[in-house]
Amino acid sequence: MNQVDYLRISLIDRCNFRCLYCMPEGTDLEYALQQNLLTHAELLTLINEVFVPVGFTRFRLTGGEPLIRPGVVDIVRAIAALPETQDLSMTTNGFLLADLAQELYDAGLRRINISLDSLEPETFDKIIGHRGRSRWQQVWDGIQAAYRVGFNPLKLNVVVIPGVNDQEVLDLAALSLDREWHIRFIEFMPIGNASLFGDRGWIASEELRQQIRDRWGLTEGEVRGNGPADVFRIPGAKGTLGFISQMSECFCDRCNRMRLSADGWLRPCLLNEDEQIDLKTALRSGVPTAQLRAQVRKLLQLKPEINFKQRDSGTQSGAYSRTMSQIGG
Ligand code: SAM
């Protein structure tokens, strides 16, 4: 097993988009009440007194949509300033990024992943569940702003959905040719939304790679990220292509992460609901942080077993109760 030193922190479970694979239309999403979100101070207490002492040094801010969390720049600044922080990154839909990119950079954020599922405004709006004036351009402006400000690496996340955006794989891959952008193709994962696309929900990464190979050729990249992506490069391209293949391959042996939800649940594996710990309630009831550290250490020891054994059934109820946006993707 890898060392587990990477914590994905959801800052808020709400989002200004409703992507059809993440918050399917018609699903009744229950958001955490404002008073149940970890406060800025509670989050820092958990990082300083629980997560850092047990070995976490790399943090990613996500959501929901992290940029709608009030005070997000202050949270970035506080985490970036910790001497133990070796890496701080963010995953965002980019809609509010054009105005915030410089402030985030100045606060110490250096790495950013932006979700961009389509280059066609109409398809894009369909995926993000938006009617009315297209939101594509604003997201594109956010990406350009992040690039200008100097975020490096700048990664674009694409969830490939058959019949919706799979015809754009080559166009999206081509974004890596002239710019140092890293495009990552993600297999759709049926979590909290199993029936969404029936049995045609995802396309195996190898199929996408073959399309790209046929067009330009593809060399295995020299960049081995910290995460689950297999990284390749079109010969001569400035950027890379990553493939996150959680459906067609098992990369549990490389898993180095846990997830903290906006309401303070620590989840040892994306697919595991049963072993979560409610750190917020414990903290608010006055449980000493030394005790929370011990609980998290125990969960770290159990993680290898949780990853493999409970991969297909990480919930006793048979269905996950939280979607990706609620867990913190
Ligand atoms: N709002 C931010 C965003 O759009 O990037 C951060 C949260 S979002 C949950 C994080 C990432 O999870 C996005 O790249 C999204 O495409 C991905 N994602 C969400 N639901 C997914 C699913 N069911 N399968 C695979 N990836 C998913």
Image (cartoon, rainbow, N blue to C red):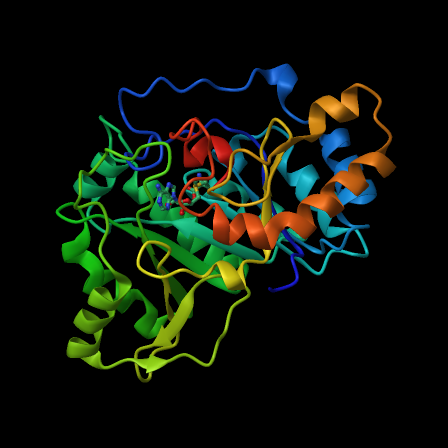
* Above or below, 174 relative to 123: below
Q: Residue at x 49, y 58 (%)?
A: 252
Residue sitting nearer the eye, 67 or 43: 43
Residue 82 lies left or right of residue 226; in this view the side is: right
- Snapshot quadrant of residue 134: top left
The image position of residue 135, as x and y in percent, is: 30, 36
The image position of residue 172, as x and y in percent, is: 26, 61
Is the N terminus in the top left, top right, bottom left or bottom right quadrant? Answer: bottom right
Residue 218 lies left or right of residue 80; in this view the side is: left
* Above or below, 288 relative to 113: above
**In the image, ligand 1 is in what quadrant?**
top left
- Snapshot quadrant of residue 127: top left
Residue 39, can we see it? no
Residue sitting nearer the eye, 252 or 302: 302
Q: Residue at x 40, y 69 (%)?
A: 230
The image position of residue 204, as x and y in percent, is: 25, 60
The image position of residue 99, as x and y in percent, is: 50, 41
Q: Residue at x 22, y 48 (%)?
A: 161
Residue sitting nearer the eye, 164 or 269: 269
* Above or below, 151 relative to 54: below
- Snapshot quadrant of residue 286: top right
Residue sitting nearer the eye, 234 or 316: 316
Residue 77 lies left or right of residue 275; in this view the side is: right
Residue 56 lies left or right of residue 198; in this view the side is: right
Q: Residue at x 55, y 65 (%)?
A: 226
Residue 172, can we see it? yes
Give the mark count.
0
